[in-house]
Amino acid sequence: MKKLQSKKLVSLVAGSALAITSLFSNYQKAFAWSDEDVHNQEHSTHHFIVNGSVKLIAENKDPAINKPTTLLNQFRDRLDQGLYDTDHINPFYDTSTFMSHFYDPDTQTNYTGASYPTARQSGAKYFNLASDYYKKGDFNNAFYYLGVSLHYFTDVTQPLHASNISNLDHNAPGYHSKFETYAESIQNQMTVPDSGLYKWIASTDPEAWIHQAAVQAKSVLPQIWNETIINWFWQAAYSNYYSSMWKNEVKNPTLAQLNQAEQETAGFIDMFFRVNGVEMPVTVYNENAFGGVSELLGSGNYEKV
């Protein structure tokens, strides 16, 4: 009798936990990597990746590659804002459906099965808009929309987004957001890339880059999403032991993918400047542009103090 009651209790606890998981999973939180803070990478894996990418560019020995560093630092606030807004306001987050944040390179669709909008299209759209503003000398808008484009690009470096597995996937509802929260918690354990930025295609077409990034990320999916991991995830609803099991299983491939994402994103940023040039339209009076001591010629947005 005691055994039967014990089993009933376990079933009740498990059922309640799963019901709660299901309830909170009804919100389609689809942040490909987390993005909960405009500037603090401790609460934003998107910013963690982009910050690492900018550092790779800055530390590159090739002057043609590290030349944009001053601009990237001077307009980092605009880059960060675009990166953040893409998960939080329309038209970027598709009224909380996040359809444009997904792209499966095999089906060329988002998680609904629709061919539009996808991260590939949206990332390229805002890359081109950023290029247009850059060529006109409007650097506030140029770097804002570059940040938006980088958000979509880094979206597809997340294997679940490159495989159209949303937070509501019936196989494991809630896993998507739990995975991203876990990735954020371990991102500082990532080994800093030592091979510089990643140029795996010669193309200057942003759609081609986004597609290739998705191909690479999807190849990692079996390491973070398989029958064993999903089984442990379900059991984690009532067992910390199984919570540790699935997290330990995905830890190393997740860290390796973050490393890969930094290099790819550095390559994508470098490609932006290869397309648009790196003419220095700013006069820098001090290395710390955020100290208010630089002047953007012709705009009046940054004034010398």
Image (spheres, rainbow, N blue to C red):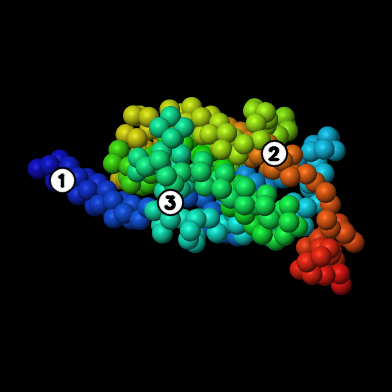
Q: Nearer the viewer, residue 214 or 173?
A: 214
Q: Residues within 10 Å of mark 2 (few under 14, many from 20)?
A: many
Q: Residue 160: horizontal and vertical position, in percent?
A: 44, 38
Q: Nearer the viewer, residue 223 or 108?
A: 108
Label annotation for residue 200: none
Task: Reply above or below: 250 against 129.
Answer: above
The residue at which mark 1 appears reads as 8
- Mark 1 or mark 3: whose residue is earlier in sequence: 1
- Mark 3 or mark 2: whose residue is earlier in sequence: 3
Task: Reply above or below: 74 against 227.
Answer: below
Write the residue at 53% across / 55% down. 86
For residue 298, say whether it is visible: yes
Residue type beneath disc 1: Lys
Q: Secondary structure at mark 2?
A: helix
Label annotation for residue 271: 2
Residue type beneath disc 2: Met
- Mark 2 or mark 1: whose residue is earlier in sequence: 1
Label annotation for residue 98: 3
Q: Residues within 10 Å of mark 3 (few under 14, many from 20)?
A: many
Task: Reply above or below: 211 against 22.
Answer: above
